[in-house]
Image (tube, rainbow, N blue to C red):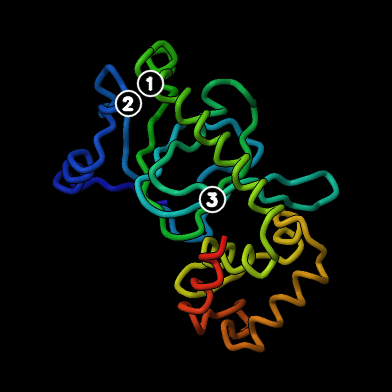
Amino acid sequence: MIVIHQNGLLEEYYNHFPLSDYFSFDICPYTSIVKFDSAEKILCEGGKPDSLYYLISGRAKLFLSHENGRISLINFLNAPCFVGEMELLGAQEAANGVTAITPCTCYEIHINKCRDKILNDTKFLRYLCLFLSQKAIGNTYNYSRNQSYPLEVRLANFILLTSCNEMYRERHTEVADFLGVTYRHLLYVLANFVKRGYLKKTKQGYYIQDLTALRQIAEDC
């Protein structure tokens, strides 16, 4: 994580992405701007966050580890959105893991310095109610979509969502669970994408050779 200290750059972010839209008090004194590299943890799983993040740019994934060692993908976060709001509200004590898919820029709100102000701010709480409601609707839509489209279409969309710099690196077991298909079926469709020249298998993962073709497939979703 890199913390941005340049005053000019800070002002530029505040002018283009004003947090004042969500709060009735000046939140800036409690806020930093931070950057995360792809694959870097934004929230550590199991910990109690000291910060509420607002994702200005980038994409991240939310995941949960099980006692048997398996990991489940829960959701994907696309800017702009809050990260860590459930922990702030006390809906869960320990955080789920959040990892950057692409480089991410965030506001980091140091809630240990302003928790009472935030939790008593009706403007912020009203926005958060709307935000959480829209997230629930989106999750319902995604679940319904996963049941309605062929795996080829859903996988193409998933690859585009989780890739960074044309590289796709997600674990097959986690992807199969998230998409609700068997491991064998997933590998079959991936191999078919490679055979058709959409992907190229490398030591680092799968390189997207034909972005246009994948997008055309994903558009059916």
- Give the class, few, some or many, for how many residues have Cα within 10 Å of label 1's Cα (few <14, many ≥20): some
On the picture, is 113 further left or further right than 50? left
Asked which quadrant contains residue 20, the reply is top left
Q: Are marks 2 and 1 in contact (CB under 8 Å)?
A: yes
Which residue: 81% across, 67% down? 183
Question: Mark 1 or mark 3, which is nearer the start of the sequence?
Answer: 3
- The one of 113 and 58 positioned closer to us in this rendering: 58
Q: Position of residue 109 (x, y in %)?
A: 38, 31
Residue designated by label 3:
41
Residue designated by label 2:
22
- Give the class, few, some or many, for how many residues have Cα within 10 Å of label 2's Cα (few <14, many ≥20): some
Q: Quadrant of the C terminus?
A: bottom right
- The one of 144 and 108 positioned closer to us in this rendering: 144
Asked which quadrant contains residue 127, the reply is top left
Q: Amino acid at mark 3?
A: Lys
Q: Which mark is residue 25?
A: none
Structural distance between the alpha carbons of marks 3 and 1: 26 Å
Q: Amino acid at mark 1?
A: Phe
Which residue: 85% across, 49% down? 68
Q: Are marks 3 and 1 in contact (CB under 8 Å)?
A: no
Which residue: 62% across, 67% down? 153
Question: Mark 2 or mark 3, which is nearer the start of the sequence?
Answer: 2
SS of the residue at dot 3?
A: strand
Q: Are marks 3 and 2 in contact (CB under 8 Å)?
A: no
SS of the residue at dot 2?
A: loop
Q: Position of residue 198 (x, y in %)?
A: 57, 83
Structural distance between the alpha carbons of marks 2 and 1: 5 Å
Q: Position of residue 214 (x, y in %)?
A: 53, 74
Residue designated by label 1:
124
Q: Amino acid at mark 2?
A: Tyr
